[in-house]
């Protein structure tokens, strides 16, 4: 057990060694218990995963599929990296993608048939549905994180080939 200071309050963190079913790797999670944090979670507690493996916390990306923003790619080309503009790299993203969501695979930003299986996460918590509904109630349409308009409410896209996450 350790105490972490946050501003003028302290949080007690209980270190838990968890075994994942993926390749017998271990990771350390911290279970945070604080009076003003995790209030929406059962018992006022939430896990805070930590990557204690080669690669550190970057191994905890949950296989999200996020390509990045168009302006970053266009900026990299302007810095002197020919071929790194968004329109050029989009061709390669689409060529490699096998998007399993028909409504996405028919857009100009996705396709089916590549070697990287991509789809919206098939498992949705009630909170995800509530966020999407709240966005719609305020006039925001659901977005595609890898599409033309990336700001808004959306369901995460993941690298997943049923029934496993693809690495």
Image (cartoon, rainbow, N blue to C red):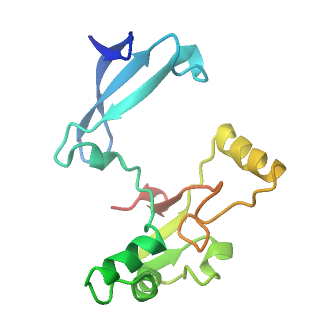
Q: Residue at x 46, y 68 (%)?
A: 69
Residue 7 vs residue 102: left or right? Answer: left
Q: Is residue 102 above or below residue 125?
A: below
Q: Camera-side residue: 47 or 78? A: 78
- Between 166 and 6, the one nearer to me in the picture: 6
Quadrant housing the C terminus: bottom left
Q: Residue at x 79, y 53 (%)?
A: 136
Against 73, residue 153 (above or below) is: above
The quarter holding residue 109 reads: bottom right
Camera-nearest residue between 35 and 13: 35
Q: Position of residue 64 (x, y in %)?
A: 44, 57
Q: Where's residue 39, x and y in %?
A: 58, 19
Position of residue 1 measured from the top left corner of the image (x, y, whole percent): 27, 11
Provide residue 95's location: percent of width, then percent of height: 43, 86
Question: Image point 26% across, 35% down: which residue?
Answer: 27
Looking at the image, residue 135 sits to the left or right of residue 164; the answer is right
Name the residue: 55% across, 56% down: 156
Is 20 located above or below residue 73 in the figure?
above
Among the 4 quarters of the image, the one containing residue 143: bottom right
For the view shown, which residue lies furthest in the left direction? Answer: 54
Count of marks, rendered view: 0
């Amino acid at each position: 057990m350790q105490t972490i200071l946050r501003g003028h309050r302290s949080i007690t963190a209980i270190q838990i060694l968890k075994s994942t079913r993926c390749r017998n790797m271990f990771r350390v999670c911290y279970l945070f218990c604080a009076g003003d944090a995790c209030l929406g979670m059962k018992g006022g507690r939430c896990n805070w995963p930590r990557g204690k493996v080669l690669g550190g916390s970057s191994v905890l990306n949950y296989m999200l599929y996020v390509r990045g923003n168009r302006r970053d790619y266009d900026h990299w080309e302007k810095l002197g990296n020919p071929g790194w503009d968004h329109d050029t790299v989009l061709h390669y993203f689409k060529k490699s993608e096998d998007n399993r969501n028909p409504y996405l695979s028919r857009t100009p930003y996705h396709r089916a048939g590549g070697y990287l299986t991509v789809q919206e996460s098939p498992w949705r918590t009630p909170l995800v549905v509530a966020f999407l509904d709240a966005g719609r109630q305020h006039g925001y349409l659901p977005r595609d994180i890898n599409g033309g308009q990336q700001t808004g409410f959306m369901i995460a896209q993941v690298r997943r080939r049923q029934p496993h996450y693809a690495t």
